[in-house]
Amino acid sequence: MTERGPGRGGDGRIPPADVDGVPVADERRPLVERIGLAAVAAVIVALFAFVAVASWVSGEPFLAFMAVLGIAMTGWMGLRTLLRG
């Protein structure tokens, strides 16, 4: 069985092709999968928020800043996954 999609079935430099040599179109993830991945990202964002608040209260501003960056990156990718697929 061959897998379809970018980065599968080869070294990544050659796009996957169907049986007749026509490139396969990228398929979007199903809505339920996108919602699930966004929910996982939301849980991770909540954990980063807890770390940010706890480290700020305990006097560790650098760790709080790093946790806020984690919130931003994880939240951004969660939204991108949900909206773009």
Image (tube, rainbow, N blue to C red):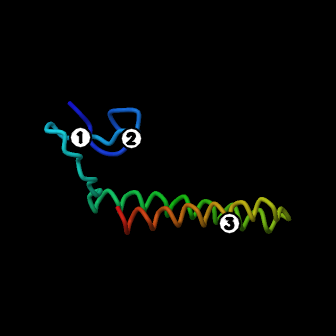
Dot 2 falls on a residue whose secondary structure is loop
What amino acid does circle 3 point to?
Val
Q: Which image quarter holds the N terminus? A: top left
Q: Quadrant of residue 31?
A: bottom left
Residue at 45% x, 68% y: name it.
Answer: 79
Q: Secondary structure at mark 3?
A: helix
Question: Could you tell me which quadrant the C terminus lies in?
Answer: bottom left
Seen in the picture, residue 1 relative to 72 is either above or below; the reply is: above
Residue at the spot of label 2: 7
Instruction: Identify the residue position indicated by label 1 in the image.
Output: 17
Left or right of residue 77, residue 32 in this image: left
Which is in the foreground here, disc 2 or disc 3? 2
Judge whether 23 appears above or below 52 on screen. above
Q: Amino acid at mark 1?
A: Ala
Marks 2 and 1 in Cβ contact (< 8 Å): no
Could you say where residue 25 lies in the image, as x and y percent from the top left?
24, 52
Secondary structure at badge 1 equals: loop
The answer to whether residue 17 is above or below residue 69 is above
Query: What residue sits 75% from the left and 65% below the top?
Result: 65
Residue 68's disc is 3
- Say whether disc 1 or disc 3 marks the residue closer to the N-terminus: 1
> Image quadrant of residue 5?
top left
Would you say 38 lies left or right of 52 here? left
Q: Amino acid at mark 2?
A: Gly
